[in-house]
Amino acid sequence: MRKFSADAASDDPSARSALPYAMIITAAMILASNHIIARYLNGVVPPIGLVFWRMVIGSIILLPFAARGVVIHRQLIRTHWRLFVVMACLFVPLGNGMIYAAYNFTTALNGGVVSTAQPALTVLLSWLLFRDLINWKQGAGIVIAALGVLIIITRGVPTNLLAFQPNGGDLLILLATVFIALHNVLLRRVPKQVGTFTFMLVIQLIGVVITLPLYVAESIFIRPVPVNLVTITSLLWVGIAITTVAVGLTNTAVRLIGANKASMGNYVRSLFTAFLAIMLLGEELHLFHAVALTLVIGGVYLMTRSRAYVTGVD
């Protein structure tokens, strides 16, 4: 999988058209629904069950489009199997599974703001692991975005942090966002010959295998996934719309216009998440939400205005 600079496709006519940006906005709307569904289903669908069936359904949908690539590049995939296993662990149980668990304890508004810091975390991890240089814009952006996340975790009351009273759900989402950012950093290690759909299918299938024993244990000792119209509809949505359509649109947009320009999807997603949380879940928008959202979006915007790039998928 290739890395793209902010101007990676500046000479491509498709990069100057409105289509990539329409893809980004559409994907952001769909990805925002992931937070809303996770919060809505908390206490009804257990988190491992939700992420397990999301990956199963997503794999079934991708199979006709990516199976040939898996067969063609099977030797390459086998050679790099450790990398794919690590990335599957980061993306499936540690990333998305932990996000679904977190919504048992926090709101979609909070989760939407915290997860918006993902690009800043990606740049920070790239520096820690691969010594990618961080310029002053990126450094300032990371600090500003971190302040926004801190405001959410402390509910706008700094003494909550001193008394160690942060919301556990917000901390889980922050940790999950770190895992997903680490997954995105490791994308540079994926062989270029392995296409986007092929990579997605491999990661999802490995994720299914990894989460299967956890899903069985959860079903036996905690609660199984209920079988009803709401559950089935929700699982189909997260499996098809979120796992396949939204991620596919995001990856395509990144290839057309570069990751920096495509990162606007993080801002749009947070705004859609806030809107849907208020309209559909009846959550209240407080002043600390607005301040935190402004800081996170401002920090990520400042960071992505540099010439460096952020590579990744959602």
Image: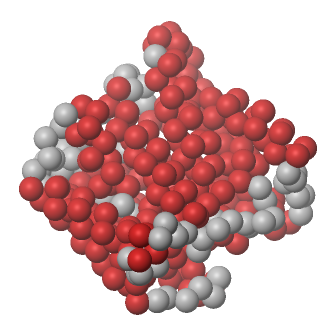
In screen coordinates, is 30 left or right of 138?
A: right
Q: Nearer the viewer, residue 271 or 218?
A: 218
In screen coordinates, is 80 left or right of 10?
A: right
Residue at image point 41% right, 70% down: 162
Q: Position of residue 3 (x, y in %)?
A: 26, 37
> Vertical placement of 135 versus 25: above or below?
above
> Vertical placement of 283 versus 203: above or below?
below
Q: Position of residue 101 (x, y in %)?
A: 66, 57
Q: Position of residue 95 (x, y in %)?
A: 54, 47
Residue at image point 55% right, 26% down: 85
- What is the quadrant of residue 235 in the picture? bottom right
> Vertical placement of 43 versus 14: above or below?
below
Quadrant where the N terminus lies?
top left
Residue at image point 38% right, 55% down: 118
| Res. 66 visible in picture | no
Residue at image point 83% right, 39% down: 217
| Res. 266 visible in picture | yes
